[in-house]
Image (spheres, rainbow, N blue to C red):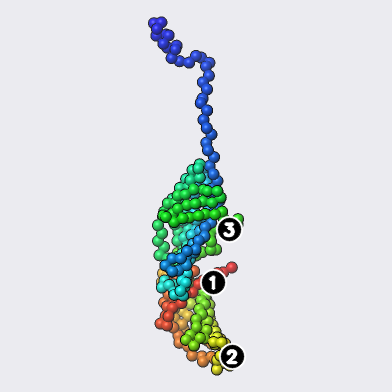
Amino acid sequence: MLALLAAGCGGSPRRGAVTTPRPTAPPAALPALAGRWARASTTAVDGDREEVRERWNLMQTGASVFGHYVRVVTRTSVDGNVYACNRGDSYTRRARVAFDGRLGADGTVTLMERAVVVAPGLCDDGVRRLAGLRGKLVGGRVELVREGEAVLLEPDVPGGADDPEPAPQWSAAPQPDGLWQSVVSRRDQLGQLRTEFEVWHLTLEGRDLGGYYDHVVTMTAREGHSFACSGAAEYTLRTRYRVAGMLDGSALFLNETSYDTVPGPCETNQRRLERYQGRLAGDEMVLVWGGGAELLRRVPTR
């Protein structure tokens, strides 16, 4: 009996005894990653010039990181050839990518792209593959790698817009109504410069398209020469064409119905009415007719 009591008393602390917890190191402070970051690069791809611009909006709650970035890629032909997708010498692809991830106490960053919204474009199929990014916060910049591509982010300028290009057309619904314009300059075999400028005014009611466009052609003779019709080294032809047609999804069909010309010494008042088929995506519209094709871009409204 006494042995049992002695064992029981020895196995528990005395009443009123105080135990001291072992000291633990305070948690390491996390670096600050939240804010706006930007990236820009220019490289040669298949003989063309490719400009990449990204603007990142990073948010942080403890070790959790989330936000989005806007990526704008502009491809420009350096040899003067046009791209089949838009009949132009350049095109732009835009996408907004959402992501989340983790930030380590040592500055390591792990991100995963979760969703993407692609701005419509004549040269963009809308397909993107979501990827992971890994890297580290080094000094005042973020060094990341995305599928072998180096992504170097620098602090963005204060007050910068969220999108590298203001007000992109993110809506997938075709919107042909409004103002569109095209400018093309080229020299003929005689060395004469021909500059064509068009401004289209289109309205949409249901699926019916209507409106008009002004076509201005300026001819400039080669140095030291003049045109017989004007007696000068330059003349201009101005024509207003009225058009009507319909919209079918992103495809449009237009017919020139009539025209008016501005009198001038070189004006013959002879025109041929054309029929157009076209495709519309965001702020770009390509029109094709029997004599060729042209790219129109939307005129921004203030």
The C terminus: image quadrant: bottom right
Question: Helix, strand or loop at disc 1?
Answer: loop
Q: With respect to residue 49, does 253 lie above or below?
A: below
Question: Helix, strand or loop at disc 2?
Answer: loop
Which residue is situated farthest in the bottom direction here? 228
> Label 2 belongs to which residue?
232
- Nearer the observer: mark 1 or 2; the answer is 2
Amino acid under label 2?
Ala
Q: Badges 1 and 3: C-beta atoms under 8 Å apart?
A: no
- Nearer the observer: mark 1 or 3; the answer is 3
The residues tagged by marks 1 and 3 sit, at their Cα atoms, a distance apart of: 23 Å
Amino acid under label 1?
Val
The residues tagged by marks 1 and 2 sit, at their Cα atoms, a distance apart of: 33 Å
Q: Residue at x 57, y 59 (%)?
A: 161
Residue 265 in which image quadrant: bottom right
Which numbered disc flags the more N-terminal residue, 1 or 2? 2
Q: Residues within 10 Å of mark 2 (few under 14, many from 20)?
A: few
